[in-house]
Amino acid sequence: MRKHFLIFAVFLYVSSALAAGHITKAQKEKTIECLGHYSATAVLPAETIEVKNMELALASAKVIREYLTSEGVKDDEMNKGMNVYVDKVYGKPFDKAKNGECNKFIYKQIKDSEEKIEKLSRTIYAG
């Protein structure tokens, strides 16, 4: 009986750890890269980007940060990864292709993110 209890306890522990829904290392890296993309987009000169894209970038960055925090990613890790991407694209024009790639990935990765981002973006510049 004791052996069965021990096996059950180990199974319960392992299954609860896996059920938490943590992201893989590759997913985390891609999510942080997209955070960098949106952060870089949000600070582009106003005359080089449509306001709607800037609003969506700001909203996306906020939703991604909340998601990564809920997944246990520390601010330092987010900022470091984000800054690597921002430094790479600083001063370059809006990357529409990368934006589409990140949108597709983030909407799939983060549940209900498309709706959250759209709703939040409408509050930024009273859009």
Image: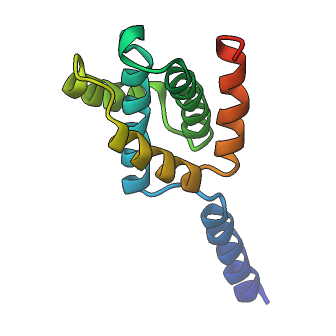
Using the rendered view, name the quadrant where residue 126 is placed: top right
Q: Position of residue 39 (x, y in %)?
A: 42, 23
Q: Position of residue 116 (x, y in %)?
A: 70, 37
In the picture, the quarter occupied by the C terminus is: top right
Above-or-below relation of 81 to 50: below
Q: Residue at x 55, y 35 (%)?
A: 64
Using the rendered view, name the quadrant where residue 93 is placed: top left
* Residue 121 as seen in the image, left or right of residue 92: right
Q: Residue at x 22, y 22 (%)?
A: 92
Q: Residue furthest right?
A: 1
Using the rendered view, name the quadrant where residue 67 is placed: top right
* Residue 78 as seen in the image, left or right of residue 59: left
Above-or-below relation of 52 to 114: above
Q: Residue at x 65, y 11 (%)?
A: 125
Above-or-below relation of 9 to 82: below
In the picture, the quarter occupied by the N terminus is: bottom right
* Residue 46 as seen in the image, left or right of residue 19: left
Q: Nearer the viewer, residue 97 or 113?
A: 97
Q: Position of residue 106 (x, y in %)?
A: 52, 47
Numbered marks: total: 0
Q: How is the image coloured?
A: rainbow
* Residue 51 as seen in the image, left or right of residue 6: left
Q: Position of residue 53 (x, y in %)?
A: 50, 26
